[in-house]
């Protein structure tokens, strides 16, 4: 039987006296267990001069503690056939390990040690900074990354969402190990963390692991945090035109700034509008722009719900002589969504796709742990369980209102990426 959010066993959520949140889901017919630790310490909480600190810290977490030498954790996990990785976003960072069920405690112990007692040694700091700088150089060769970062910079000029998660060479070279230790001790505290455990481990055992391994945290330190408020909409739209010598195909990227996670109904509506516009051959933009008119090679729409703002993004891959026509067509489609209610067939298709995608995200212990951790640090763990019902209850009137207020009538920013034929 596939493991889904609707499995027979039920997840439990517990908040310890320390403020640490623990989500546990026992799956007895699974041979593995995943421990996924989520921290509200993404690049959103970085002051501007510290841009890139959260992602850099993700690297440095694995450089050991006073009791655990660099590389030992990876050797331990790989030695028992497990896997581990980490990721940093604007709103969070998370660290996960998946191992055979009988190795769960063995793997979680060193992971908790790394997260709560990271040493951030000076020598490793300098070496790993070179690795991150190379990561930035490689990202700069990706035209989609360049276009996306340019778009975010226009949409969020005063907010951390407008800065690269990787930081810049200038900000990284200006940082010190002591500042990173300060950042770690400020944000890697129990009130900011969720430990999600899913797989073949019972509740009492899982809670015993957490009690043993997450009982001691570093003494909190002050860290500068600057998260300015975001206005509901942009006062005007901006456009940026980038010519890139290594680009083979032009891009049109259009972005709208919408309410964030707290306005859950609006965020769910935007999720559904992204499906209606740009998911699958039956979606409006794919069917019209790619299949019927053949004005684009491809078109996609995505909705990135964040703490302070939802980014609604439409990207088209096309020839330069089609840019104005395609942009005008997209704007017309958004106006149409704001003027007329969506029909039952189109609405049911979008609901099915969203609900199925949510269910597919819970087929393995690692997917379940990731889903629970994400919802816990972003908003409410309960939303992970009730999302299908939330989607099913969306009415055409809500979609019409959201499309009209936040897409059709709001300014947007755009980036055009053009192949630089003269530089080739």
Image: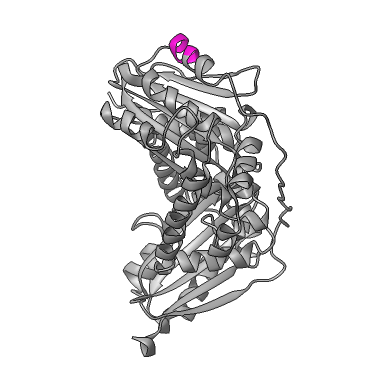
Foreground residue among 262 and 308: 308
* Residue at 40%, 46% in the rendered image: 349
Quarter of the image that includes the N terminus = top left
Residue 152 point in image, percent of width and height: 57, 63
Residue 179 point in image, percent of width and height: 63, 47
Q: Is 250 rendered above or below residue 72?
A: below
Could you tell whether 238 is left or right of 88 in the image?
right
Helix, strand or loop: magenta stretch: helix
Q: Is 23 rendered above or below residue 274?
A: above
Query: Which quadrant would residue 162 be assigned to in this image?
Result: bottom right
* Residue at 58%, 24% in the rendered image: 21
Q: Is 232 rendered above or below residue 375?
A: below
Residue 389 point in image, percent of width and height: 51, 32
Name the image colouring.
one colour
Give the residues drawn in magenta, as a range. 203-208
Foreground residue among 249 and 243: 243
């Amino acid at each position: 039987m596939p493991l889904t959010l609707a499995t027979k066993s039920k997840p439990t959520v517990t908040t310890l006296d320390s403020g640490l949140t623990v989500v546990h889901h026992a799956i007895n017919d699974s041979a593995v267990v995943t421990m996924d630790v989520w921290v509200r310490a993404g690049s959103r909480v970085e002051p501007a001069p510290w841009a890139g600190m959260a992602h850099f810290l993700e690297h440095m977490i694995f450089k050991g503690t006073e009791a655990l030498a660099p590389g030992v954790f990876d050797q331990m996990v790989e030695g028992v056939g497990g896997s581990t990785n980490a990721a940093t976003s604007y709103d969070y960072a998370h660290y996960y390990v998946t191992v055979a069920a009988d190795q769960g405690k063995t793997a979680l112990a060193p992971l908790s040690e790394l997260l709560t007692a990271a040493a951030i040694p000076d020598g490793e700091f300098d070496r790993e900074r070179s690795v991150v700088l190379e990561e930035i150089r490689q990202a700069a060769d990706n035209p989609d990354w360049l276009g996306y970062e340019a778009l975010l910079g226009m949409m969020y000029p005063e907010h951390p969402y407008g800065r690269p998660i990787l930081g810049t060479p200038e900000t990284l070279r200006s940082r010190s190990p002591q500042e990173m230790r300060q950042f770690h001790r400020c944000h890697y505290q129990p009130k900011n963390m969720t430990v999600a455990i899913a797989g073949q481990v019972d509740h009492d055992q899982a809670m015993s692991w957490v009690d043993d391994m997450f009982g001691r945290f570093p003494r909190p330190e002050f860290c500068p945090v600057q998260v300015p408020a975001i206005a509901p909409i942009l006062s005007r739209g901006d456009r940026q035109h980038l010519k890139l010598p290594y680009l083979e195909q032009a891009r049109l990227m259009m972005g709208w700034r919408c309410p964030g996670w707290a306005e859950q109904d609006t965020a769910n509506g935007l999720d559904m509008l992204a499906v209606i516009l740009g998911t699958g051959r039956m979606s409006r933009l794919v069917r019209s722009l790619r299949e019927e008119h053949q004005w684009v090679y491809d078109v996609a729409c995505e909705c990135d719900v964040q703490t302070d703002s939802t980014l609604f993004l439409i990207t088209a891959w096309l020839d330069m002589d089609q840019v104005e026509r395609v942009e005008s067509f997209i704007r017309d489609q958004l106006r149409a969504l704001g003027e007329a209610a969506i029909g039952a067939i189109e609405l049911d298709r979008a609901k099915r796709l969203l609900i199925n995608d949510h269910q597919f995200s819970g087929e393995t212990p690692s997917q379940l742990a990731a889903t629970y951790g994400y919802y816990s640090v972003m908003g409410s763990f309960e939303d992970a369980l009730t999302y299908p019902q939330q989607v099913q209850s969306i009415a055409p009137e809500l979609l019409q209102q959201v499309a009209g207020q936040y897409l059709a009538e709001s300014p947007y920013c755009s980036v055009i990426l053009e192949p630089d034929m003269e530089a080739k």
